[in-house]
Image (spheres, rainbow, N blue to C red):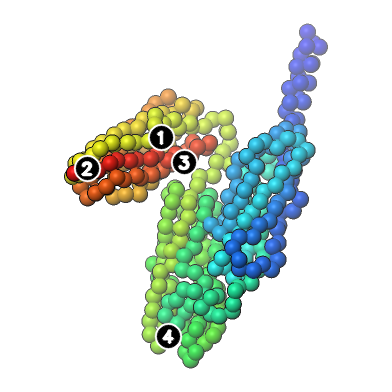
Amino acid sequence: MKKLWSSALMLLFCSCLMAQEISFKSDVYNYGNVREEGKVYGDFVLTNTGDAPLIIRRVTASCGCTTPEYPKVPIAPGDSAIIKVAYNTEGRPGNFNKTITVYSNAIAQPTYTLTIRGTVEGRNNTAASLYPKEIGPLRLRSNQLFLGEVTLGSLRTETIPVFNQNEDLPVKISFQSVPKHIRVSVSNSVLEADETAIITVNYVASDIKDYGRREDFFYVTVEGSQKFSGKIRINAYLKEDFSKKKNASKKAVANYTAPLVDFGELKKGNQAELSVKLTNTGTETLYIRKIDCPAAQLQVKASKDAVPVGKSADLTFRLDATKLRSSVKYYVDVITNDPVHPLHRITVSATIVE
């Protein structure tokens, strides 16, 4: 009997020692000098240095100009794989430094940060090509920032180079209507003629109570002989950070009765309602974080925001065809705290008839 217990304990001890680990040949990829000719590609070589299969759960980039591709199948112990990263040079002359975050089931380091950097040589060196956007005498590299996926609780930093094209007068730069979760500064608030500066934008996701797609903006005011103002837009997709969840086995699971809501033929001027049932088949409360609906004619409401284990909530879709003239198709995003499938997209369609 003692031998049986000893064998069982030894087997349990050995199984506990099994773990998947991740290591990279290098966590920085330098593209060097590249021409402004579309996308350039770089590879990060990773190895499973553990003794259990390694799974790359997802890979996110710090901005929309960077696109990572990663292996979708488990990586056996001792095997290597490649994360390929594409950087879009189009319209981005100058130095760049971006980060990529790798989420895996590695025990010691489930979150790993990679960096890409380099210099894009512009097609020409005119102010119009290097700084294509204008606010009065001030030219800007861009008037819109695409942050891509941003994890709640994180900090994202982006920059916008600017140039005073005024040949005679200095200009003063200031900022208005800046959201509370955004910090904006400029390296030099007073630019002499032909001088450059850098606008730095810090996106503090820890100060945001939102999920999914989000657009913010602030204004840049330029004062010289006249006063000008221009809008800077910031787009991001806010994601919950499930990597810090202490009990991974305890989770909410969202199950939907249908991925499609089809109203069929709907007479113009009428209104109609359809419902989808959302059931929590997990082991902890399911929270509906946000329902992102893109059209004013379509309203979506949940019967409850918190769905207990084994219970359901009704998602009611109400379509108003008063101002609709033809067939329509909308995509509604339902965001929950289901760590495996936090985003569920429901297609809503209808054919409007007279």
Q: CA distance from mark 2 to mark 3?
A: 32 Å
| Residue type marked 4 | Gly
User: Quick one: 86 or 207, which is closer to the camera?
Assistant: 86
Q: Is residue 240 left or right of residue 125?
A: left
Q: Is residue 186 visible?
A: no
| Residue type marked 1 | Pro
Q: Nearer the viewer, mark 3 or mark 4?
A: 3
Q: CA distance from mark 1 to mark 4?
A: 55 Å
Q: CA distance from mark 3 to mark 4?
A: 47 Å
Q: Position of residue 146 (x, y in %)?
A: 50, 59
Q: Position of residue 210 (x, y in %)?
A: 43, 49
Earlier sequence position, callout 2 versus callout 4: 4
Q: Position of residue 310 (x, y in %)?
A: 42, 24
Q: Is residue 335 left or right of residue 112?
A: left
Q: Is residue 260 left or right of residue 339?
A: left
The answer to which quarter of the image holds residue 121 is: bottom right
Check contact, mark 1 vs mark 4: CB within 8 A. no
Earlier sequence position, callout 1 versus callout 4: 4
Q: Which residue is mark 2?
A: 353
Q: Position of residue 48 (x, y in %)?
A: 74, 40
Q: Which residue is mark 1?
A: 259
Q: Which residue is mark 4?
A: 224
36 vs 156: above or below: below
User: What number is the disc on residue 204?
Assistant: none
Answer few, some or many: residues within 10 Å of disc 2's Cα (few below 14, many 20 plus, some between 14 and 19): some
Q: CA distance from mark 1 to mark 2?
A: 24 Å
Mark 3: secondary structure: strand
Q: CA distance from mark 3 to mark 1?
A: 12 Å
| Residue type marked 3 | Leu
Q: Which residue is mark 3?
A: 343
Earlier sequence position, callout 1 versus callout 2: 1
